[in-house]
Image: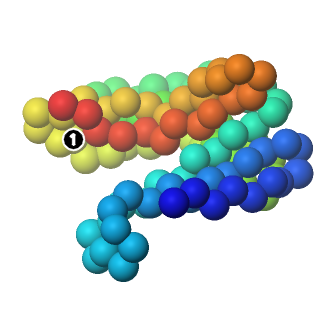
Amino acid sequence: MQVAKKMLLGATIAILGAGALGSTNALARTVIYADLEPPALRVETVPAPRPGYVWVDGYWGWGHNKYVWHHGRWMHDRHGYRYEPARWEREGNRWRYHDGRWDH
């Protein structure tokens, strides 16, 4: 199932669902596309290591029809996992947002 909505500045948001209709365990994710290249990442001071936590760098997200900066933050460490930071990736003549996630 895919529903897309055209937004100002050429951004498209699609809600993708996995699983059968009516399924209680269906997963949904939001896919964001923008026609404009994201701004350069901001330079932030990385704090000293903190036991049990992982520092996640700041990134450009999307909100209110424009790029929005999200400051770096601490996240609880997940043993056996590695954090993949949020990023924008070029796909043809537009940019696709990939949210940060834990990977193993």
Residue extending furthest toward the right: 8
Q: Residue at x 65, y 23 (%)?
A: 91
Q: Position of residue 66 (x, y in %)?
A: 80, 47
User: Is residue 52 left or right of 44 when viewed as pictured?
Assistant: left
Q: Residue at x 59, y 37 (%)?
A: 97
User: Is residue 79 left or right of 84 when viewed as pictured?
Assistant: left
Q: Residues within 10 Å of mark 1 (few under 14, many from 20)?
A: some
Q: Residue at x 60, y 24 (%)?
A: 89
Three-letter amino acid code at the position of disc 1: Asp
Quarter of the figure with residue 52? top left
**42 w.r.t. 76: above or below:** above
User: Is residue 12 left or right of 47 when viewed as pictured?
Assistant: right
**28 w.r.t. 60: above or below:** below
Per the image, the residue denoted by label 1 is 77
Q: Position of residue 14 (x, y in %)?
A: 62, 54
- Tell me, what colour scheme is on the image? rainbow
Front in this rendered view, residue 77 or 36? 36
Which element is circle 1 on?
Answer: loop
